[in-house]
Image (cartoon, grey):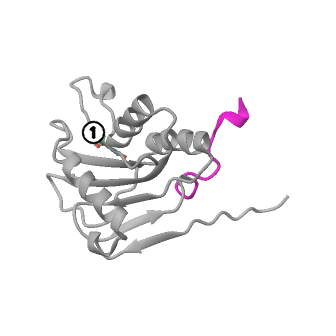
Amino acid sequence: MKSVNITATFTIYDGIGELPEPAQNLMEQAVLARENAYAPYSNFSVGAAILLDNDKIILGNNQENAAYPSGLCAERVAIYSAAANFPNVGIKALAITATSKTKDLDTPVAPCGSCRQAIAEYEVKQKAPIPIYFMGKIGKVAKSDSLKDLLPLAFDKTFL
Ligand code: THU
């Protein structure tokens, strides 16, 4: 028997202004995407922006539905759109931002488990890490260098 210790490292930036330029622009695009979220049930709006290897930016936001489970998170709207339209283009980075109508989100909001699993699929597919920047409405921005830091022990195709 032995214990295994898994560690994850994140970079914390004081705000959008401290991000390196490509990430700053990407987060600003995520903010724009967030403003178009359709979230009448949760009043929780999320925006996601993906920078592709061809330098195109793909946006996504959460899309809710009166049949609640039929809705989809911003990250998956964005990553499935990227994969559908640019199936052979890698992902350079992902930026995520979230706001709530009921509270001021001033700490980084990490992607949900289902979105982590979806992002993991494309990280494995492209055989290169996907840096992920995430924040609330204002304040600090967290960065993980790879999805692996957000989802250790991920299930992937190697098990199939
Ligand atoms: N949501 C996202 O868009 N991304 C996440 O990672 C977490 C949750 C959305 C789903 C739903 O529309 C709302 O936020 C509240 O859960």
- Residue 65, above or below 114: above
Q: Report whether 74 appears left or right of 145.
A: left
Q: Nearer the viewer, residue 64 or 124?
A: 124
Q: Nearer the viewer, residue 72 or 121?
A: 121
Q: Residue at x 66, y 63 (%)?
A: 6
Residue type marked 1: Asn
**Quadrant, the C terminus:** top right
Determine whether the residue tagged by mark 1 lies in a helix, strand or loop: loop
Q: Report whether 59 appears left or right of 10.
A: left
Identify the residue at the far right of this view. Answer: 1
Instruction: Find disc 1 in the rendering and name its residue.
Output: 62
Q: Residue 22: x, y in percent?
A: 36, 62
Label 1 Cα crowd, 10 Å radius (few <14 / some 14-19 / many 20+): many
Q: Residue 92: x, y in percent?
A: 47, 52
Q: Residue 50: x, y in percent?
A: 38, 48
- Give the total number of marks visible in the rendering: 1
Examine the structure image and report whether residue 138 is included in the region drawn in magenta: no
The response on whether ligand 1 sits within 8 Å of label 1 is yes
Is the magenta region chiefly helix, strand or loop? loop
Please identify the quarter of the rendering in which residue 99 is found.
bottom left
Q: Residue at x 56, y 39 (%)?
A: 121
**Ligand 1 quarter of the rendering:** top left
**Quadrant, the N terminus:** bottom right
- Residue 73, above or below 149: above
Q: Residue at x 25, y 33 (%)?
A: 63
Q: Residue 134: x, y in percent?
A: 36, 59
Q: Residue at x 43, y 46 (%)?
A: 54
In the image, the segment drawn in magenta is 148-160
